[in-house]
Image (spheres, rainbow, N blue to C red):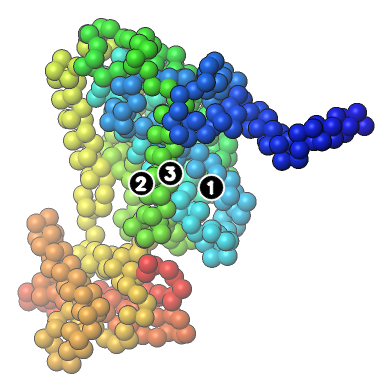
Amino acid sequence: MGVINNVAHEIRKEGVISWLLRQLDVFITKLTTGLNWNDLRGLARGDDPRRPNPRLTVHSESFWFHIKPSYYHQSVTKLTHTFRLGLLSTYFFFIELVTGIFLMIYYAPTPQRAYGDMLNILSNVPFGELIRDVHRLTAEGMVIVVFLHMVRTYLTGSYKKPRQFTWLTGVVLLLATLFLSFSGYLLPWDQLAYWAVTIGGSMIDKAPPPVLGKTTQLILLGAPAIGPAGLLRFYLLHVLFVPLLVIFVFFIHYYKVVRVGISLPSSEEEVGQDTAKRVPADKRRYYLPDVFTDEMMLLLLITFVLLALIVLNVYPGAPLEHHANPNKTPLHTKAPWYFLWIQGLLKLGDPTIMGVVVPTIVFGFLFIMPYIDFNPSRKAKDRRFAITAWMLGLSVFVILTWMGTPFFKVASPPAEEVVQLMLPEEEAGPVRETDWAQLQLGEWDTRVDVPGNAESTANPTMQGLMEEYAQHIVVEDVKAYEKGLDEGLPNGYGKMIIEEWQDGLKKLTMRVFWQPEGSDEQTFEKTFFIDEESGYAR
């Protein structure tokens, strides 16, 4: 009763409105650990703080802000110095956590449920497709941003003393990011995921000595081949163990960043000097409000760009192909794009050396690089060898990535390649990407001069498809000749037969014809079905 009487007395003395405003101010001060309403208004307007400065109290008392420095050197806050890549990678990881928890609600990691749950998320769960697209896009964006963050650190020499251990934890975070993305690759349980992870699992099996490789594979997959045990293990790695590792190493990494400071531009320091922690008063840029405002505006911009890429269909969406089938290997199976360079290495020689030993040497070198680089200068003019080595390494990486694609050392029959380009087994392709209603019933021929085929030239959509079809036949014939294959596609042409199979379902028969000199005409045929609700055409 005493508390109520005191409150009533205060209200009578101050008035209801004044008392409520004062209580609101007290609540805001507690919530912000030191900033009252007027302080927040001053932050928004860019006013100078009152004395003593309550904005510094936030960094010592707030749970969220205590890991952030209260001020930075103004040179390191320029966008072009760090591009805020560390912040962006952290933000992408946060988005991964939020969207991942949402997807976990509707997903069960069993071969019997996984694929059906993905279909349910895409078709029945409110905003399910959007959440999955955001999750997939930010996962791939996180791989790119973490990689670029390390590239920026390398090119500016920011890994040098006293930041060697910071670099080392960054390499751990890069590996964890790659494995975090790779472990989630299997969860849809479709053909694309199943066979991509199968490639990765086969590389683990090649690790020397054989007993180590096979044991590691059994621990990771739970069996010689991917099955229920492997799916459950990948799920636990993806949603629990790897995220915990990322969080743990991130705080070590960021603690070292704060402890030694962000390196200044090399032009502002003498060789061998490190003055990041000695910031003159006139060079300070306080986190509140300046740096905080910059970061929030950047994150808002990135959020807008991510959503725009998805809503405007610039990003084609997270793929979901046919249900995983261990008995059918899709044509041109490939690893995730960030591991294509390893798949390219596998095409060059022994899988143990190229798939295990070489990547281990590459990442091992990244770990020890700061400790064996004895050049104290971070200036580009003094690091010509290091920068040249980086450019050479990047060129090799790009070439190996291309070699990992189906365009290098993959020799399928030319006719099969033509159909694969028009209607891939596990991707969309130009035919599926065409609006379902525009796939007009009838028999279409790539030879526009064939009698009775004038209709294909009167239908712009089908005319475009037939022109692309014909172009692929010509290109594959030339490739076969260049590769020295026994048979190309001489006098080749193609047909596409579209039939209404049932309501909302069309049957497409792709036929490729060719006639070698002195032989009868030969044919390759493949049949597909496209549902009106397939969602390929965006």
Q: Quadrant of the C terminus?
A: bottom left
Instruction: Give residue 349's quadrant in the image.
Output: top left
**Is residue 202 among what the camera can see?**
no
Frontmost residue, 341 versus 122: 122
- Type of amino acid under label 1: Thr
Q: Is residue 518 above or below residue 92?
A: below
Q: Position of residue 213 (x, y in %)?
A: 44, 32
| Number of other residues with Cα within 10 Å of mark 1, as a class: few under 14, some 14 to 19, many 20 or more | many
Which residue is depicted at the point 53% across and 47% down? 99
Q: Is residue 503 above or below residue 109?
A: below
Which residue is depicted at the point 47% across and 35% down? 44
Frontmost residue, 159 versus 530: 159
Instruction: Give residue 210's quadrant in the image.
Output: top left
Disc nearest the viewer among 3 and 2: 3
Which residue is under mark 3?
A: 300
**Is residue 113 among what the camera can see?**
yes
Mark 3 and mark 2: Cα distance apart in space: 33 Å
- Type of amino acid under label 2: Ala
